[in-house]
Image: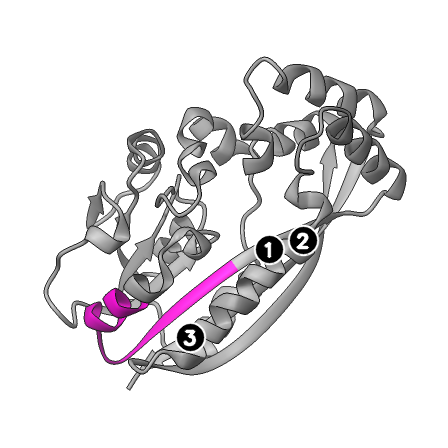
Amino acid sequence: MGYGVDGRATGFGEIARAYDRARPGYPAALFDRIESELLALAGARVLEVGSGTGIATAELLRRGAVVAAVEPDPRMAAVLRGKVSLAQVYDLRFEQLLLPRSSFDLVVAAQSWHWVRQRDGLRKVSLLLREGGFFVAFWNLGSVCDTRLSASILEAFSRIKREIPVLLRPRDLRKRIGSIERSLALASELLPAGRFEFTEVVNYSREAFIDLLGTMSDVLALAPGLRPGVLAEIGSAAPVEVAVEYRTVMLCAARG
């Protein structure tokens, strides 16, 4: 789901299958809210930006949407194509996408919009949406509930003087979301249509948690030779079951 805004954005393809296996889905209540507040998904023409391996895509399809996807990483797109049947998969950056105006009822970005160049991306969204269509971006912000495990993760990363994983600093991603929300408010082509939050706790086995941690961009930024040792150290400190609280933030906008 990389777009070049941050070099880490293009690193997920190397662990595409692990990403699909380990990353959490999104609350059913989020899709319910899209349908109750914005539009019915059955029959809706949807463009998904940075679809990755199709974690959100599968639910959109289950609810009857006709989905086309933009996924520039061919390794992520290969998993996506093998998992779901889509109207089209575009293997390029969203900013490079050339399609007729007003082609879609809904543009969705799940855990991906912060990799997009905001001004170019919002301009593209406004061109691709029909009048009265909607743009929705959402993110899972995870926090490790066990403070002792959080301290162990911090220690492991501090020892190699590297940035700590986002699971220990959801405030950083929340700040980026705040910046995106301000960009939406200033976009002349789109009108803010709501901000929603959903909360749930997911319990992982120790092995599944380490699998999840290994898909984080901050971990992928480590030299390949460092990753196994760091993950093994964290695994030795992790309890048998690890609870992660997810706050899912959804921003909505409408094309007037």
Q: Which residue is mark 3?
A: 184
- Residue 168 as seen in the image, left or right of residue 37: right
Label 1 and label 2: CA atoms lie apart by 5 Å
Q: Which class describes the residues within 10 Å of circle 1: few (<14), some (14-19), or many (20+)?
A: some
The residue nearer to you, when weighing 17 against 189, is 189
Give the extent of the magenta segment. 122-138
Confirm or deny contact between disc 1 and disc 2 (CB under 8 A).
yes
- Percent from the top left, x then y, of residue 47? 28, 59
| Residue 64 left/right relative to 112 | left
Going by the numbered disc 3, the residue's amino acid type is Leu
Task: Measuring from the top left, give residue 41's x and y in whole percent.
Answer: 35, 68
Q: Is residue 23 magenta?
A: no
Q: Residues within 10 Å of mark 3 (few under 14, many from 20)?
A: many
Spatial separation of the CA atoms under disc 3 and disc 2 = 21 Å
Q: Residue at x 49, y 75 (%)?
A: 182
Residue at the extreme front: 161
Residue 173: which disc? 1
User: Residue visible at 87% across and 43% down?
Assistant: 147
125 and 242: which is toward the camera: 125
In the image, is 139 to the left or to the right of 228? left
Q: Give the side of residue 215 with respect to residue 1, left or right.
A: right
Q: How many marks?
A: 3
Residue at (59% x, 13% y) in the render: 225
- Going by the numbered disc 1, the residue's amino acid type is Leu
Q: Which mark is residue 170?
A: 2
Secondary structure under badge 3? Answer: helix
Question: On the image, which quarter does residue 136 sit in?
Answer: bottom left
